[in-house]
Image: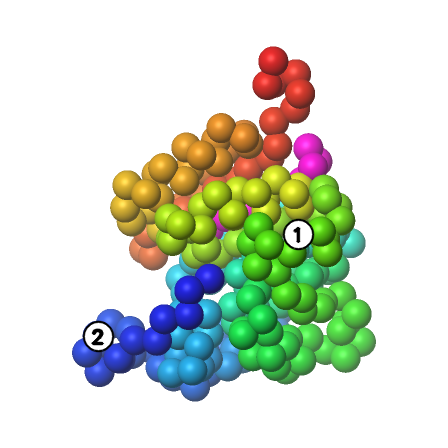
Amino acid sequence: MALLPYDGAMIPELRKFHEASATFHFAKRDIVIRQDWKQLGVAAVVWDAAIVLCTYLELGAIQLRDRTVIELGAGTGLVGIVAALLGADVTLTDREVALQFLESNLRENIPPDQRTRARVRELSWGVNLRQFNPGSYDVVLGADIVYLEETFPDLLETLEHLSSERTTILLSCRIRYERDQNFLKMLGSRFRVERVHYDAKKDVHVYKAQKRTVREDL
């Protein structure tokens, strides 16, 4: 994930991202997420794609309770925190520079008696994959991680490594540019992909992907 601070005074639409915290209500709880745009940029604010994905998870369209879940590019941790509060066993991942910040949000929002359900680990896409057992997750989550074209091959490699044919991948994103469509085509060459949710107000899509079976590839 790119860590690119911006000058909020120059972009009024981004002013909300410069608030020290943001409060959300999911899983019957108020979740207070600390933000730190000045130090960590895009990795440390809550984007609409994360909110939409949390809403989709809360709808119960996929089973989370007692499932093993991994979140890629977790940033503030909102999506992973909501998944844990909904009963999943969650590993929240991001690059090393963002981990301390991510851990602080986790500590503040997961009750002590549920703390064993969630942990933070470093994961740079396509780099340290051997530290994660291949195909060992029931669900892979990603919110607004499809935006840097140079990361697409590593992201695809990571999705392939973490998932098996039984894994459900949920990616929440805006389709801004042709490169975003290109990623969906790349994803579709290796996974079965369908759009399962669309928030028209926020213009955010949620895509579900699952590995193709050997028979499908023949």
**Mark 2: secondary structure:** loop
Q: Taking the image as drawn, is residue 111 in sight?
A: yes
Left or right for 103, reference 207 = right
**Mark 1: secondary structure:** helix
> Where does the C terminus fall, quadrant-wise?
top right
| Magenta residue span | 164-172
Residue that numbered label 2 is attached to? 11
Return the residue nearer the eye: 177 or 66: 177
Q: Does 34 lie within the magenta span?
A: no
Residue that numbered label 1 is attached to? 129
Find residue 213 and report its horizontal and vertical position in percent: 65, 24
Return the residue nearer the eye: 123 or 181: 123
Find residue 125 and report its horizontal and vertical position in percent: 56, 54
Please give the name of the residue rendered at 54% of the width and 30% of the height, measured from the top-left corner.
190
Please give the name of the residue rendered at 45% of the width and 38% of the height, measured from the top-left corner.
195
Q: Looking at the picture, which amino acid does disc 2 mark?
A: Ile
Find residue 47 and report its horizontal and vertical position in percent: 41, 65
Q: Looking at the picture, which amino acid does disc 1 mark?
A: Leu
Please give the name of the residue rendered at 67% of the width and 20% of the height, measured from the top-left corner.
214
Tell which tag, 1 or 2, sits nearer the viewer.
1
Circle 2 packing at 10 Å, graded few (<14), some (14-19), many (20+), is: few
Return the residue nearer the eye: 163 or 127: 127
**Among numbered discs 1 and 2, the one appearing first in the sequence:** 2
Q: Does 171 lie within the magenta span?
A: yes
